[in-house]
Amino acid sequence: MDNSDLPTGETPQETADRVAASPLFGVTDEASRRRVIRQCLLAIPWIVVLVPLIFYLDSLRYGRAEVGPLGWGMTVFFVMYCLLTAIGLFFRPRTEFHSPVRLRGDWADRVGAFWLVSCAFGPFFGWIVTTGIIPITPTSWRWLYGLQVFLAAGVPLLLTLPLTRYVRGKSTLVALPMLVFVTLLPVLTALTASQDLWEGPVVSSVRFNGQPVWRLKHTGVELRSEKAF
């Protein structure tokens, strides 16, 4: 395989160098590489404080006084962005930690290329599914929650599989923890939904007309129905 075999005509290392040298990062030499790594790491404490604070202050306008899942999700997204950027720049010149398996450029690589995108946006779209755009009722809750679990956990797990063939040699010390940890983050966002899928709704109260009120215990969502489930 040479560069002409790849869709962009670049090896992954050449693509990484081109992106690092772009105006967004400005990495052109060793000094600038160290500077950007330091900036990314120093940005993380600010992100952890400021992003939840912004969402908290905004929620006060609606009388909720909470950060909410979107706020925490956005915080994790920016923290991981800075952390992965710093890790990528740190190990770029340390070629002994690069995978010895050459990029194949086949369909599995094209699918696996969306792994990080799915880890970031899978939980977001899964959250949208169950935010009330479609009413969560006794007839819809199961497929809505099933779709959330699939988007937030199933898709990232599936897209991780094609990347495991590159976890070889010394790269295992970096790639394996990264694959496991980053994939675990979206999976955890679907934990309560998967528990509700497994256990089903429970009766939380009974209305004055004798009809039970069904609620999903782990997510705390009440099923919108006047009929018994």
Image (spheres, rainbow, N blue to C red):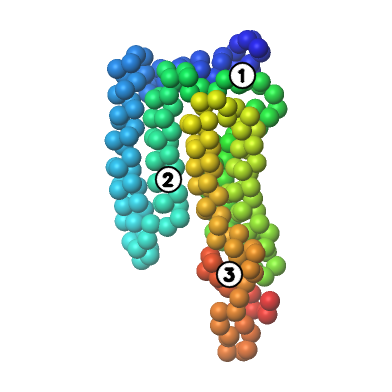
Q: Quadrant of the N terminus?
A: top right
Mark 2 and mark 3 residues within 8 Å of each other at the beta carbon = no
- Whether residue 90 appears in this view of the structure is yes
- The dot on residue 102 is 1
User: Badge 1 local density, few (<14 within 10 Å), some, or many (20+)?
Assistant: few
Camera-nearest residue between 74 and 119: 119
Q: Nearer the viewer, mark 1 or mark 2?
A: 1
Q: CA distance from mark 2 to mark 3?
A: 26 Å
Check disc 3 and give the amino acid type. Answer: Leu
Asked whether disc 1 touches disc 2, contact meaning CB atoms under 8 Å apart, the reply is no
Mark 3 is surrounded, within 10 Å at the Cα level, by few (under 14), some (14 to 19) or many (20 or more) other residues, namely many
Residue 76 disc label: 2
Residue depicted at x 29% and y 24%: 35
Question: Image quadrant for the C terminus?
Answer: bottom right
Residue placed most toward the observer, 125 or 36? 36
Q: Secondary structure at mark 2?
A: helix
Task: Decide which of tag 1 and tag 3 comes sooner along the chain.
Answer: 1
